[in-house]
Amino acid sequence: MKRRSKWLIALLVAVLLAVAIGRAVVERQARQRQAAVPPAVTAIELGPADLVRAGPRELVRAQPVSGSLRAVDTALVKARVAGELRELSVREGDPVRAGQVLGRQDDSDHAARLRQARQQAASARAQLEIAERTLGNNRALVDRGFISRNALDTSVSNAAAARANLLAAEAAAQVARKAVDDTVLRAPIRGQVSQRFAQPGERLAIDARVLEIVDLSQIELEAAVPPEALAGIAVGAPASLRVDGIAEPVPARVVRINPAAVAGTRAVSVYLSVAPRPALRHGLFATGEIELGRDTRLAVPASALRNDRSRPYLLAVEGDRIAAREIVPGPRGRDAATGEALVAIESGVADGATLLAGSVGIVEEGTPVRLTGAR
């Protein structure tokens, strides 16, 4: 009886052990099957603002430029002689005419030298008259034999010397006259006074700056352009500028291209003529672009182009999934109608392709999407 009880107990233990092992195996297989099932991916909703469409656009290619506006004609009024500045009748912003008297320097010393030079010229003229009368008398005396030929030659030399002295004295008087005239400061061009460097009462050295005058009737922008962009720029090319303080774009045009590059930077100066308007001022900073050309191309907004991989690509909506499409980008520019920054597409996506806008951010390829609203 005891032997039978032991056999029953052993059998029960074996059954329980088999059940436990079988249950563990079943649970393990269930966990493996559950792990093999991919987690459900939630579809992202995309509205009209999240999508852009590839299509033909009029692409304007342009070269950015910047620089300071400057008047084509500017002039510095400088002191031509040394002396005290006695008066200056104009200030910044005053309009002036070419030749207008702007100020005067003290001319007392120069006027005295002019009087002295004139007196010396008068004395030389009188000496010449005496020498010429003496020469005439001696010629008559030579003919009568009262004086020698040598005496006549001396009279000729004296007359020539007196004539030379007169010419030198008259030249000195002209120099003194010019020095007096140079004490009067005149405007060399028409325009407006932009700077006043001296005040009445100051003693000026020769070539000391007194005034600057600018003519705002002709204004230009000098812009440095990289050499690789020069091939598309020609004289007459249109441009558009943005100037500080002026809301609307200011039209301009390329009028000159410097034949030499700037040492160090190798950039080339391009000069743009700016249409004059009252708000434009010498020295204002301007930015803008020179139009290189325009044509119709398959293009997308530049913000939609993605560059976080080895090659540029676009995220396209194909069916209900996101697909990454590598593309070959073309030239960049702006939309002729809206001004939006565009990039041309040489290959990679077709006309009419629906793409993710750059504002959507990073989205994994294969992500399901659901479109909301009309596009």
Image (spheres, grey):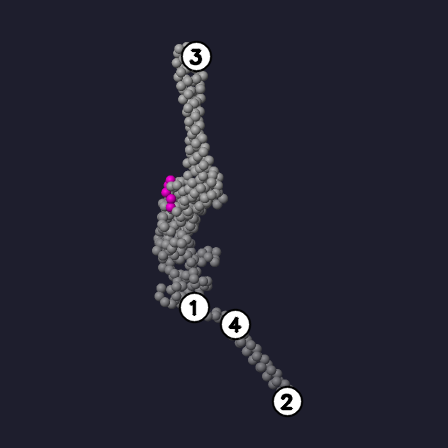
Between marks 2 and 1 in the image, the one whose residue lies nearer the viewer: 1
Q: Earlier in the sequence, mark 2 or mark 1?
A: 2
Query: Mark 3 is on which residue type?
Result: Ile
Query: Which residue is the site of mark 3?
Result: 147
Residue 368 sits in quarter:
bottom left
Stretch in magenta: 95-99
Label 2 SS: loop
Residue under circle 1? 43
- Asked whether the beta carbons under mark 1 and mark 4 sit within 8 Å of each other, the answer is no
Q: Main secondary structure of the magenta part?
A: loop
| First-in-chain label (1 vs 3) | 1
Q: Amino acid at mark 4?
A: Gln
Separation of residues labelled 2 and 1 (CA atoms): 71 Å
Q: Please check the rendered image and state whether residue 97 is part of the magenta-colored stretch, yes or no.
A: yes
Determine which of the numbered discs, if any, sits on residue 1 in the image: 2
Residue type indicated by callout 1? Ala
How far is the residue under mark 3 from the one under mark 2?
A: 194 Å
Using the image, determine if residue 166 lies above or below residue 257. Answer: above
| Residue 147 location, quadrant | top left
Q: On the rendered image, what quadrant is the N terminus found in?
A: bottom right
Q: Secondary structure at mark 1?
A: loop
From the image, tell me which residue sits under label 4: 32
Point out the tag, 1 or 4, that comes first from the N-terminus: 4
Q: Residues within 10 Å of mark 2 (few under 14, many from 20)?
A: few
* Vertical position of residue 324 compared to residue 40: above or below: above
How much space separates mark 2 and mark 4, taking CA atoms? 47 Å
